[in-house]
Image (cartoon, helix red, strand yellow):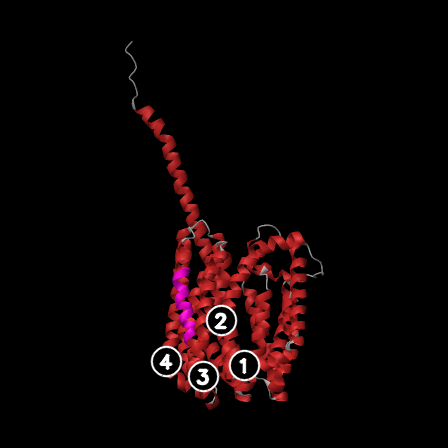
Amino acid sequence: MPPEPVNRAAPSDEASAPEMDAADASDGHREAAHKLREALLKTFFTGLSWTAAARGLTSVGTAARYILFVRLLKPFDFGVIASATLVCTALSAVSDPRMGQALIQQEDRIDPYLDTLFTTYFVRSLVIGLILIMFARPLGNFFHLGEAYTVFWAIVPLPILQSIQSPRLISLYRRLDFHFVTIMNVSEVAASLIFGLMAVLYWRDWRGLVFSLLAGAVVRDVLTYWLFPHWPRLSFSMAHAKTMLSFGLWFSFGMLCEFIAKQLDNLTVGHLLGPSALGNYQMAFRAGEMPVAEFTMSASLVTFPMVARLRTDRRARVRLYWSVVGVVAAVGLAYAAFIFAFGNQVVLRLFGPAWIHAVNPLKVLCIYGILQGILVVGRSFLNGLGKPERYVIAAATRAAVLAIAIYPLTAWHGPVGAAAAGVISILVALPIMAYLLQQTD
């Protein structure tokens, strides 16, 4: 009987089977990763559309409110309210532990943390209110407000109202349910406009502007409890606080540096040039940064939690980053071109001749708005990657440069010099931000 032929192909086929299985598994892994990436990007653009709609409607309402109030009041009145809100937000920035941001990244249930979060911010708001009451007259002298120093008493309820919103609101950012942002923002602006208009017509001075802010804050508080029900208790857990502070303190310090960089110019203008000049500068600042600021605020609300999910996917993060930066640049450049061409006519027709001194700083602040938008995008990416300490480097550099440049430039060139100092500070910080983002992998 002849010997059976030897099948020499069999060993080769058997040996290649594991390799084929491995290749199939690798292809399957890549396909799954691709599908996950596409799903997350779809979620991002859905969330962005909702937040953009919310911010867009808010900006339209805010612009309408601003134009209407500007027609009824004087730059001095806006300078008075700007001085009060500047001090109030400064105290908030200095004392804000940013504990809520830590919960966005928290993988566990957040319910045990909510009462500690609520209690911390409520007590903090009472301290801020006490400081405003005690130092109202010295602050009024610093900003040359005269008898209008009582604005610091009038604004005391604002930080308290901001602190007592439902702490479960933080779940909005965890679940990416950004359509609720539209409801809250539009309702807040509508209430601020309607009740503020009645108050401005009644008082005919800065008191109407304070009432407008308070009315909007009350409506927002009510909506947070309606949309995100939670009955908070005044209780505090040190263990829960430490967990939130481990992330929040770095984030808080970075935001404090950013606040200094964004508000030091207002502080300097108000002190050197008085409330009328500050009113003009505040109007120019808001108008100059508004289009880009509204988009980047919308984008950062979404990119922060999205980037946290894309930590291991560099390709998707890079694609997301350049998409957002591209839109920021396009929107900012188009708006800057419009203001440089028609800024004088826009200010005269919308605000009136009393605000003509805002035109020149407005043009510079359009450039500021573009650069600021790019910096904010970088901040949201670093925070989403769990690297808030890296953003502190860029924010601290920006604040230091502004601190050096703001006083002499404002003294020499007025509001235009203050705006230029802001642009210079961001130009120095942007290369640092680019390097920090490059080193995140």
> What residue range appears in magenta?
420-433
* In front: label 1 or label 3: 3
Q: Marks 3/2: CA distance?
A: 18 Å
Q: Marks 4/3: CA distance?
A: 13 Å
Q: Is residue 40 above or below residue 368?
A: above
Q: Amino acid at mark 2?
A: Lys
Q: Is residue 423 magenta?
A: yes
* In front: label 1 or label 4: 4
Which residue is under mark 1?
65
Which mark sits nearer the N-terminus, 1 or 4?
1
SS class, disc 4: helix
Looking at the rendered structure, which numbered label has been put on residue 358? Answer: 3
Q: Is residue 96 above or below residue 346?
A: above
* In front: label 4 or label 2: 2
Which residue is under mark 4?
340
Which residue is under mark 2?
262
Between residues 95 and 100, which one lies in front from this camera angle?
95
Q: Marks 1/4: CA distance?
A: 24 Å
In which quarter of the view is residue 3 placed?
Answer: top left
Q: Amino acid at mark 1?
A: Arg
Q: Amino acid at mark 3?
A: Ala
Q: Is residue 138 magenta?
A: no
Q: Marks 1/3: CA distance?
A: 18 Å
Residue drawn where x is 61% and y is 62% of the image: 169
